[in-house]
Image: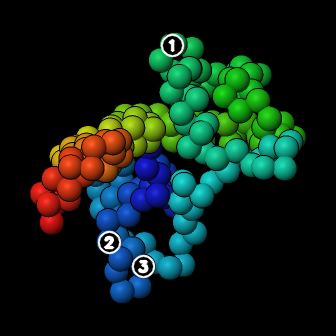
Amino acid sequence: MNLKEIISITGKPGLYKVIAQATRGFIVESIDEKKSRTSISSNHQVAMLSEITIYSIDEESIMLADIFLNLKKIDEEGTLPQLNADARYLQEMLAKVAPTYDTERVYNSDIKKLLKWYNILEAANLLIEETQEVESTDAQIEVKVAESIEEPLISELEESKEEEMNTENTESTENEPESDDPEEDTKTAKVTE
């Protein structure tokens, strides 16, 4: 899931994708069926979804992307609550996807906003797990690397085996026992000269 280009603009409903940079701001496109484009100035307060975290009782905050992935699992089970669900039910749902979230600093309006954003991203089919993308890309890279390395490695192995065999043959002829017959020694000496 790539949330780096997805932003939330304070005072504007929904989520937006950054299309281009203008002279005094950005051009954004809404992530909905309309796909309407608008420009925003540098005066607007903008939050990138990849940078948003949820308060946690631990020292580390919980990344929004992790919560969206866990929400997707609940959605696949069919137990994702509606936006108008009871506050207690929404809190229980968030406790399932982010067990360490801070119940005192995360309000029901925040949970509803999370669900709203999740529904927008899911409708736009933007909740594809990065691990699946990375695994498939890594597998393709491994195959390409293996193919490019395999042939040279095989030829290197064959060459090293040939060298070893040649070395063993020369060592075995050098290490042959000398005979007691002096005539044979002179014959081999003449042949080697």
Observer-side mark, 2 or 3, equals: 2
Q: Amino acid at mark 3?
A: Gly
Coordinates of residue 86 in the picture (x, y in percent): 70, 21
| Of 68 and 32, the residue lying toward us | 68
The disc placed on residue 25 is 3
Q: Quick one: SS at disc 1?
A: loop
Residue 11 makes an appearance in the image: no
The image quadrant of residue 87 is top right
Q: Amino acid at mark 1?
A: Gly
Q: Residue at x 46, y 58 (%)?
A: 4
Residue 175 makes an appearance in the image: yes
Coordinates of residue 27 in the picture (x, y in percent): 34, 70
Label 1 crowd (10 A; few <14 / some 14-19 / many >=20): few
Q: Residue at x 70, y 23 (%)?
A: 96
The disc placed on residue 78 is 1
**Mark 1 vs 3, N-terminal side:** 3
Observer-side mark, 1 or 3, equals: 1
